Amino acid sequence: MNPVSLIQLRHIAKTYDLGAVRVHALRDVSLDIEAGEFLALVGPSGSGKSTLMNTLGCLDRPTTGSYLLAGEEIATLGADERALIRNRRLGFVFQNFNLLARTTALENVELPLLYTPGVSATERHDRALEQLELVGLGDRLDHHPSQLSGGQQQRVAIARALVNNPDILMGDEPTGNLDSKTSRAVMDLFARLNAERKINVILVTHDHLVARCTRRVIVLRDGRVVVDTPEIDKGLEIMQAASWETGEAAEETMEEEVPPEEQTDPEDSA
Ligand code: ADP
Ligand code: MG
């Protein structure tokens, strides 16, 4: 029998109920992701990439379907339980870095450990220092974000994402605010963390250079997985074609009009 995958999605759907319209942001997504993978989620704007990432990241709950993370069902968990899982297993990196402005690099990296029970102030300091050294910022501990370049800020954010020893590092357009040379350096860092520490890296991107650093590309269109391949260039080529077809020519629409008698208060389904 195969051991269970690190991530197993089965028939995941996410529908946003806006009253007069329903948006099918994800439809029937089934995926397996093994420990140690490095992958890119790509697709046209509005194809469901962030929704899938937020689902994988336990930030959001699917409307239907099953999500097993290391064998544990996530789809039915409440917000507090999902927060615990995020803290234990996941690290997040954002397009705009999301660092606290009036706080040093070291304090920014220590922050997630404040929510981890049983970690003393000394251990917090030592673990944060270790991660900042790992990302090459051991000499910038007392700098505030405004004193750091974009690439350095993103490396602080990566150190912060690593400080709880996550199984998975996730980023939604993590290089979106960086120039191409700096993006390359940040991608080299993700690649090194993946190779040396066996951390899963899952990135949403529309940058082909970023996707080409990964080893598997998943193409979304209209909320569905249309391609899932280790042949990155082939996947990107199909995505280009898919981008052409969205909108008017798409076979199905993400938005469905809801007849008045079926409309519920959107607040109820949030
Ligand atoms: P992408 O990241 O690929 O651009 P998203 O996952 O952000 O796509 O969005 C997919 C679809 O779901 C879009 O049609 C978007 O407008 C819709 N959507 C996303 N988040 C919400 C939300 N909170 N409420 C309503 N609709 C949403
Ligand atoms: Mg998005």
Image (cartoon, grey):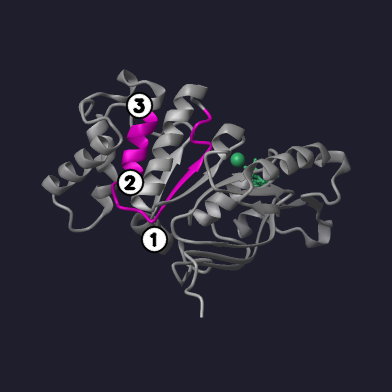
Is residue 263 something one can see in this rendering? yes
User: Which numbered marker is on residue 85?
Assistant: 1
Q: Is residue 207 visible?
A: no
Q: Residues within 10 Å of mark 3 (few under 14, many from 20)?
A: many
Residue at horizontal 36 percent and vertical 33 percent from the top: 155
Q: Is residue 116 above or below residue 1?
A: above
Instruction: State which quarter of the image contains the C terminus.
Output: bottom right
Q: Secondary structure at mark 1?
A: helix
> Residue flagged by tag 2: what amino acid is it?
Leu
Give the amino acid at mark 3.
Answer: Gln
Residue 55: % across, % down: 54, 55
Binning the other alpha carbons within 10 Å of mark 1 as few (below 14), some (14 to 19) or many (20 upward) gives some
Q: Label 2, on which residue?
A: 162
Q: Is disc 2 in contact with disc 3, using a CB cutoff of under 8 Å?
A: no
Ligand 1 visible in quadrant: top right
Quick one: label 2 or label 1, which is nearer the N terminus? 1
Instruction: Tell me the mark number nearer the camera, choosing from 3 and 1.
Output: 3
Q: Which residue is mark 3?
A: 152
Q: Secondary structure at mark 2?
A: helix
